[in-house]
Amino acid sequence: MDSLDAKILLALDDDPDATVLALAARLGIARNTLTSRLQRMRQSGAVRDYARRVDPALLGRPLLAFVSIELSQHSAQGAIEALRAIPEVIEMHSTTGDADLLVKVVARDTADLHRLTGEIVLAPGVVRTGTVISLTEEMPLRLRALIEQTAQD
């Protein structure tokens, strides 16, 4: 990603509903340049799905928790596939340390979280879990400062 790509992302962040023509004019570049760069960034994964911007609370899932999962090493892939099939599992990372996976989940309430963790435990290869409930989001995912830094380079 170069500085022009970063400037395009910042312009989209400022006005996500802007037309390609309006963005190109604002950035002082050709419409075709903007279109090809946007297409390349989407294909490379630099620009992710719009669904990532949706607040799970608006979908009836206001409770956010993190589940650390210890896996049986010979069936880790089966566990990962089973966890991907659970809609409330919204993010998953392989980790070092005591847990093999750190999973971000959303739930309707604590009873729903209890149901969800029970479902997670049933995934093949799951040995042990630990759950931590998020009380408040002190800082949401932020990338704008990094994009601004790239735009200046």
Image (spheres, rainbow, N blue to C red):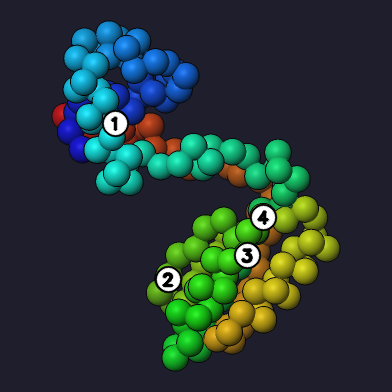
The quarter of the rendered structure image containing the C terminus is top left
Q: Is residue 48 visible?
A: yes
The residue type indicated by label 2 comes to: Thr
The residue type indicated by label 1 comes to: Leu
What residue is pinned by disc 1? Answer: 38
In this view, the residue farthest toward the right is 111
The residue type indicated by label 4 comes to: Val
Q: Nearer the viewer, mark 3 or mark 2?
A: 3
What residue is pinned by disc 4? Answer: 106
Q: CA distance from mark 3 to mark 4?
A: 11 Å
What residue is pinned by disc 3? Answer: 86
Q: CA distance from mark 3 to mark 2?
A: 20 Å
Local crowd size for mark 2, using a 10 Å CA cut-off: few (<14), some (14–19), many (≥20) = few
Q: Where's residue 49, x and y in %?
A: 45, 41
Above/below status of 8 relative to 87 = above
Q: CA distance from mark 1 to mark 4?
A: 31 Å
Chain-order first, disc 1 or disc 4: 1
Helix, strand or loop at disc 4? strand
